[in-house]
Amino acid sequence: MNIRRITQKDAESVMRIFEQSRAFMRDNGNREQWNTDYPGLEEIEAGIEKDGYVVVEDEKVVGVFVLSDYDEAYEKIKGKWLDDEPYGVIHTMASGGARSGAGQFILDWCLDKKENIRLDTHKDNSPMRNLLAKNGYQYCGVVTLEGRGERLAFQKTGTGS
C-alpha cells in the first residue's frame, strides 16, 4: 500500500468507499455518524484542494482520509488534550473494508508525518475506537463538530504519550 494526494479521478472510487463505510457502520450499530449526504462530493473536492489523501494498492483506491494541521472545533473540549503542542488532525478516514489493515496503515503514516495526532469519532463507532485503543491513542474528552454533534476526542504523540 502507498498513500498519495487525492485527485479528481479518484472521486468515483472514494464515493464507493464512503458508501461501503456507511453500510459497515450501520451493520455495526453506528447509524448516526455518517448520513447519506456526509461525506460526499463536497468533502472530496475540499480534499483535492487541501489535505485529502487516498490509500492505493495495486492501482486501486482502498482508503481515504484527510490530514490537516488544525481544527477549530478542537479548541473547546469537555476534557483535556494531552498537550498544547502543534498537532495534525485526521478526519473522514474510511476504507470500506476493501483492504484489511488500511486503517492501521493510515494511522501509522499520519503519525510518521505529524508527531502529534488528534482525531475524533462517534460514540457508536466501536471499530474505530478499538483501532485507536490498539494503537495507543488516549481518550481526551468530547468535542462538538458543527452540524454533526458531539464526538469522542483522542490523541497520540510520537513521544509515546
Image (cartoon, helix red, strand yellow):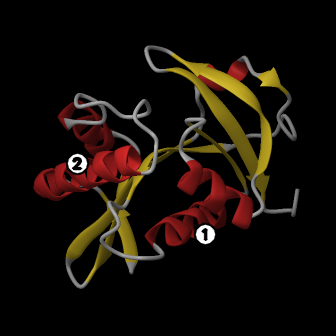
Q: Position of residue 120 (x, y in %)?
A: 60, 38
Say which quarter of the image contains residue 110. bottom right
Q: Is residue 142 above or below residue 157?
A: above
Disc on res. 139: none
Q: Dot 2 lies on which element?
A: helix
Q: Position of residue 28 (x, y in %)?
A: 44, 50
Q: Dot 1 lies on which element?
A: helix
Q: Is residue 115 above or below residue 47?
A: below
Left or right: 124 as drawn, with respect to 59: right
Is residue 141 among the parts visible in the rendering? yes
Residue, x 55% and y 35% (percent of image)? 122
Q: Is residue 156 above or below residue 147?
A: below
Report the quarter where the N terminus lies: bottom left
Q: Residue furthest bottom?
A: 58
Report the quarter where the C terminus lies: bottom right
Q: Position of residue 149 (x, y in %)?
A: 53, 18
- Mark 1–mark 2 distance (CA, rounded to whole Å): 24 Å
Identity of the amino acid at label 1?
Asp
Is residue 114 among the parts visible in the rendering? no
Between circles 1 and 2, the one closer to the viewer is 2
Residue, x 20% and y 75% (percent of image)? 60
Say which quarter of the image contains residue 127. bottom right
Q: Is residue 112 above or below residue 37?
A: below
In the rendered structure, which disc, 1 or 2, sits on the residue that comes first in sequence? 2
Where does label 2 land, which residue?
19
Residue, x 40% and y 47% (percent of image)? 25
Left or right: 15 as drawn, with respect to 121: left
Q: State the residue in front, 11 or 130.
A: 130
Identity of the amino acid at label 2?
Glu
Where does label 1 land, which residue?
108
Q: State the residue in front, 12 or 125.
A: 125
